[in-house]
Image (tube, rainbow, N blue to C red):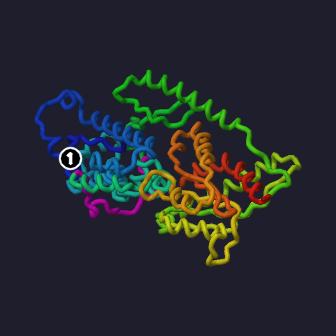
């Protein structure tokens, strides 16, 4: 909104199908009745709405799927923003070389709106040249790209990769030399120089009554009002189910108390390969949840039995059945550990419980269990799905490996916290029974 161009808006040649889409001489209503200045404002608002739409769907819509279906993704939007910044900067520089007398495309618009066009135009050029992918990506994603990857990126399945590879002729291409930053960032914000009319192009996000972002589009092909009404009813049902889940009685500490040695095993190809900028998050989530749940149990014991727990071993292994089996057997004392690890009372695994071909934690666990508790994780999944329906997709299992309890948790930190709150108070009593025998 800092600059209104009077030139016609054309699609970048880097966008697949741009030539075909622009190849029309028809004077549509939009082109004949909507001025270029107003059209630019409308299109900026549409772009903002697109970004907000994708931000609301960060978990549901992955970049690889966008590329496969449409040939572009969030990264492309960020790069096209940089490309437009380069084009506008070059246009303004050409105007400067032409004398800066108010002629030329864009120059007259800035003169009309600032009264001191040359100085302010120079500030705009500096800001445009300093604008790079990192800055535009933060606008498109709603946060920095590394932060978005940490929160929302999911491992691509073999099927996704196959479809992605077959769709490569559709993919947008970007000239890295054009995207490179061309200058230092200005010390004074250009937005403070008052060079644009006060026109807002900020998109509004769909929200439910709770304020949480909704996946309901405000321009879908259905009756939005009826869908919202139905959604409100569904939201009320979900809220009631969540409240009922929270009201479920939690087992207290076992009589006489118990001391537990805990092992935490993260199963993840990317974590094992140190591909996460933040490192493993699931394992620490298990440890933090363990401390929280034990603290709550002890606080509610009112002088009765207490629970003490210590994490005696932690590790990260890739999604390989043999690696998982070997670790579980060592930590349960069934085979001698290489580093003389103490035998665990409980082993919590996190990750590898989904439906990807690489998600093999349940299979590896079942291979080492002496006695499987078939109903335990099904019950946990049922409890969790009252407030998070996708919890039902976890295939985790549980049981005994020797005298050690093993339980599979999902790989997301949020899922770990939810499952630990329900599962661990019950596991404590199973561990007590094992120790008593």
Q: Nearer the viewer, residue 6 or 408?
A: 408
Q: Position of residue 33 (x, y in %)?
A: 21, 27
Q: How many marks?
A: 1
- Identify the residue at horizontal 27%, vertical 56% (top origin): 165
Residue reaching furthest to the right: 303
Q: Secondary structure at mark 1?
A: loop
Using the rendered view, name the quadrant where residue 203 is placed.
Answer: top left
Picture quarter with the N terminus: top left
Horizontal relation, residue 370 to residue 250: left or right: left
**Label 1 crowd bin: few (<14), some (14–19), many (20+), radius 10 Å:** some
Magenta-colored stretch includes residue 177:
yes
Q: Main secondary structure of the magenta part?
A: loop
Magenta extent: 170-191
Q: Is residue 266 left or right of residue 357?
A: right
Q: Position of residue 331 (x, y in %)?
A: 64, 68
Q: Is residue 24 above or below residue 234?
A: below
Instruction: Classify 272 as above or below 118.
Output: below
The residue beneath circle 1 is: 104
Q: In this view of the protein, can residue 124 be seen by the observer?
A: no
In the rendered image, residue 197, in percent from the top left (x then y), is placed at 38, 37
Q: Residue at point 44% right, 53% down?
A: 154
Residue 381 visible in the shown view: yes
Task: Identify which residue, 321 or 270, lies in the foreground.
Answer: 321
Decide whether residue 89 is among the magenta residues.
no
| Residue 177 in picture, x, y percent from top left | 27, 64
């Amino acid at each position: 909104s800092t600059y209104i161009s009077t030139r016609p808006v054309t699609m970048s040649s880097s966008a697949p199908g741009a030539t075909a889409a622009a190849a029309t001489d028809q004077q549509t209503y939009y082109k004949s009745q909507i001025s270029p200045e107003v059209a630019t404002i409308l299109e900026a608002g549409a772009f903002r709405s697109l970004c907000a739409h994708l931000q609301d769907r960060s978990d549901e819509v992955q970049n690889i799927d966008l590329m496969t279906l449409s040939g572009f993704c969030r990264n492309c939007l960020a790069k096209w923003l940089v490309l437009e910044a380069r084009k506008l900067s070059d246009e303004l520089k050409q105007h400067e070389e032409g004398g800066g007398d108010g002629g030329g495309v864009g120059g007259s618009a800035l003169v009309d709106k600032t009264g001191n066009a040359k100085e302010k135009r120079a500030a705009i050029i500096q800001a445009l040249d300093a604008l790079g992918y990192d800055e535009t990506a933060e606008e498109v994603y709603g946060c920095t790209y590394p932060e978005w990857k940490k929160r929302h990126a999911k491992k691509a399945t073999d099927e996704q990769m196959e479809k992605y590879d077959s769709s490569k002729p559709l993919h947008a291409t970007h000239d890295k030399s054009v995207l490179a930053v061309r200058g230092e960032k200005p010390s004074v914000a250009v937005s403070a120089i008052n060079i644009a009319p006060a026109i807002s192009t900020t998109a509004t996000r769909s929200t439910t009554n709770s304020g949480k972002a909704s996946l309901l589009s405000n321009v879908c092909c259905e009756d939005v009002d009826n869908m919202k009404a139905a959604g409100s009813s569904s939201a009320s049902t979900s809220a009631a189910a969540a409240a009922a889940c929270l009201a479920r009685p939690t087992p207290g500490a076992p009589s006489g108390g118990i001391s537990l040695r805990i092992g935490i095993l993260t199963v993840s190809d990317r974590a094992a390969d140190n591909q996460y900028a933040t490192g493993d998050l699931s394992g620490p989530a298990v440890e933090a949840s363990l401390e929280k749940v034990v603290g709550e149990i002890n606080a509610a014991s009112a002088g009765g039995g207490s629970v003490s727990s210590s994490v005696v071993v932690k590790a990260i292994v890739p999604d390989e059945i043999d690696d998982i089996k070997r670790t579980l057997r060592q930590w349960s004392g069934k085979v001698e550990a290489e580093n003389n690890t103490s035998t665990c009372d409980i082993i919590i695994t996190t990750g590898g419980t989904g439906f990807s071909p690489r998600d093999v934690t349940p299979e590896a666990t079942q291979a080492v269990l002496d006695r499987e508790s078939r109903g335990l994780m099904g019950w946990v999944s049922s409890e969790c799905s009252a407030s998070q329906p996708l919890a039902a997709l976890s295939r985790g299992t549980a049981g005994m490996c020797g005298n050690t309890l093993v339980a599979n948790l999902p790989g997301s930190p949020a899922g770990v916290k939810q499952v630990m709150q329900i599962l661990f108070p019950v596991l404590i009593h199973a561990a007590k029974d094992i120790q008593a025998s």
